[in-house]
Amino acid sequence: MTDTTAEPVLLTDRQGPVAILTLNRPRAMNALSQALIRTLTAEILWLAADDAVRVIVLTGAGDRAFSAGLDLKELGAKSGLLGMVEADGERPNPIRAIENCPKPVIAAVNGVAITGGFELALACDVLIAADTARFADTHQRVGVIPGWGLSQKLSRIIGPSRAKEMALSGRFITASQASDWGLVSRAVPAARLMDEAMALARDMAEVEPSFVAAYKQLMDEGYRLPFGEALALETDLSRRHNTALRPDELEARRAGVQAKGRSR
């Protein structure tokens, strides 16, 4: 799976406060080459620090694949490279970059999301899938242990039984199944995928960025804690944040919510 053109492996488009990142290796089913991993990681880090960007949408070029995962042909050409790619440390890691991004990252899953591509989608905050999308964990078929969190995240999202069904068989599930299982927020007609993702992104972009970052961090940190500790975390942040909120700010925002509700 090597690129045969000089086209960039990642495309970036700006639509106001929303940045759209497109994995651009359609002939290789948007497989994650070393060049794409480096470029994607760097771009996520750059956008995370750009105050003009409030939301990121991640998708794949073409209609066949969001991403087929790591480029195994490239990795197989050098002994030991596969083990280093998914390891923590100094190597570029797009999963960590997305997870640590203070801004919402929406995955617009336009085709198959397989193995490393599946892990990439799961790193995002919200997944919206085209009705033609499919998901699979095929680590077992190539004899590779996941290193970007799939073995732990999947069971927490869809339950251990369904996670093991996918992990130990390599079976694909449809976008409809993924929606039923709670793996994706929703499945939409393929022709409307980007419209739906952008509409959500624009709604998120209307919220004050520091609030979004704090709320996202609260949810992410709480998800990793036992329930009682997570509630205590929320109570502490709520007390500190809400005590500092001025009545006039609250009233202005309440009026804004009402106005938005009347316009829909």
Image (cartoon, helix red, strand yellow):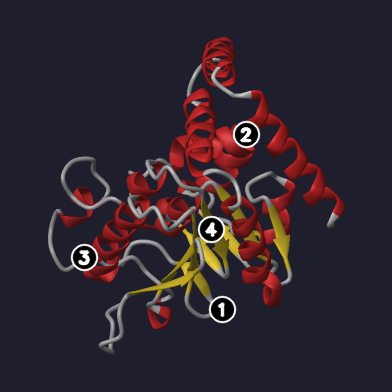
Gap in angstroms between the C-alphas marked 4 and 3: 28 Å
The quadrant where residue 30 appears: bottom left
Q: Is residue 87 left or right of residue 228?
A: left
Q: Nearer the viewer, mark 1 or mark 4?
A: 4
The quadrant where residue 47 appears: bottom left
Q: Earlier in the sequence, mark 4 or mark 3?
A: 3
Residue annotated with mark 3: 76
- Seen from the viewer's position, the closer of residues 188 and 253 is 253
> Residue at the bottom extreme?
5
Is there CB contact under 8 Å for labels 3 and 2? no
Q: Position of residue 226 (x, y in %)?
A: 53, 15
Gap in angstroms between the C-alphas marked 1 and 2: 29 Å
**Residue kind at label 3, given as amino acid type:** Gly
**Residue kind at label 4, given as amino acid type:** Ala
Gap in angstroms between the C-alphas marked 3 and 2: 33 Å
Q: Earlier in the sequence, mark 2 or mark 4?
A: 4
Q: Nearer the viewer, mark 3 or mark 1?
A: 1
- Seen from the viewer's position, the closer of residues 39 and 236 is 236
Alpha-carbon neighbours of circle 1 within 10 Å: few (<14), some, or many (≥20)?
some
Res 168 visible: no
Is there CB contact under 8 Å for labels 3 and 1? no
Alpha-carbon neighbours of circle 4 within 10 Å: few (<14), some, or many (≥20)?
many
Q: Is residue 27 above or below residue 217?
A: below
Q: Earlier in the sequence, mark 1 or mark 4?
A: 1
Q: Position of residue 218 (x, y in %)?
A: 51, 27
Image quarter in which the N terminus is found: bottom left
Gap in angstroms between the C-alphas marked 1 and 4: 14 Å
- Seen from the viewer's position, the closer of residues 47 and 135 is 47
Residue annotated with mark 4: 107
Q: Earlier in the sequence, mark 1 or mark 2?
A: 1
Residue annotated with mark 1: 63
Residue annotated with mark 2: 159
